[in-house]
Image: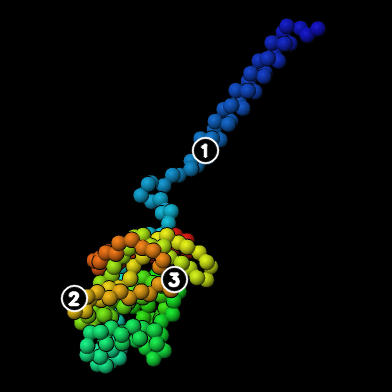
Amino acid sequence: MTRPLTLCAALLSLCICSALLAQTEATQASTEPATEIAPAGQLMPLAVPAAPPLSVDEVLAVPEELRQLVNQKVVQLARHPTARLEKLVEFMFSPSGLGLTYDDTTRTVAQTFADRKGNCLSFTLLFLEMARSTGLTADMQESEKVLLSFSDTDTLVYTGHVSASIKINGRRQEIQFDPNNPILRGSVDIITKARSVAHYYNNRGAELMVA
């Protein structure tokens, strides 16, 4: 049986050891460098800010080289507005003109001219600016309810749609650049330049989201 005096001595020794261990841990903690937290103003950004969007004038700007081509191949060869309109459509797609081909990317007027390709909206923006440069009265028109038929996939799509409208002798003529066939559509409205460029921003935003 353990004597009371021996038990007390053992307990006292255990208490002293515990106190010394606690003091050692506290000393080590006080000497370790604290983790620094950068001020809010010095934190690294999560992402690089995107470039500012193009202005309306930048989206619709016609390169000088294109103006000269339109003057040479359209204006000088066709005096009457109707003939000029026909020449302009021919100039866009013939091999001796721009020879444009269709793809799904939305481009500015200058980009469509440089790349020689674009989508329906790109072609419409380019055509309208060229038409205006020849003296024709040209506007974009839109319909928010169009049923399109995609012939290559037998697919029907209910969507919005834009096209070009040329006014000659008080009458408007529609120029379509969509390779798919509109089956049904609702009302058609003439829109401003600002709204036509809003369609460009909308398309580009959707393209960048899925890129």
Amino acid found under the numbered disc labelled 1? Thr
Q: Which residue is mark 1?
A: 31
Q: Earlier in the sequence, mark 1 or mark 3?
A: 1
Camera-side residue of 196 and 60: 196
Structural distance between the alpha carbons of marks 2 and 3: 29 Å
Residue at image point 54% right, 33% down:
27
- Is disc 1 placed on a helix, strand or loop? helix
Residue 71 appears in the rendering? no
Amino acid found under the numbered disc labelled 3? Asn
Q: Quadrant of the N terminus?
A: top right
Q: Residues within 10 Å of mark 3 (few under 14, many from 20)?
A: some
Structural distance between the alpha carbons of marks 2 and 1: 89 Å
Structural distance between the alpha carbons of marks 1 and 3: 74 Å
**Relative image position of residue 109 (x, y in whole percent):** 33, 76
- Is disc 2 placed on a helix, strand or loop? loop
**Relative image position of residue 140 (x, y in whole percent):** 28, 70
The disc at residue 180 is 3
Q: Tell which tag, 2 or 1, sits nearer the viewer.
A: 2
Q: Tell which tag, 2 or 3, sits nearer the viewer.
A: 2
Q: Do labels 1 and 3 touch, CB within 8 Å?
A: no
- Is disc 3 placed on a helix, strand or loop? loop
Residue 187 appears in the rendering? yes
Q: Earlier in the sequence, mark 2 or mark 3?
A: 2
Q: Which residue is mark 2?
A: 170
The disc at residue 198 is none
Amino acid found under the numbered disc labelled 2? Gly
Q: Earlier in the sequence, mark 2 or mark 1?
A: 1
Q: How many marks?
A: 3
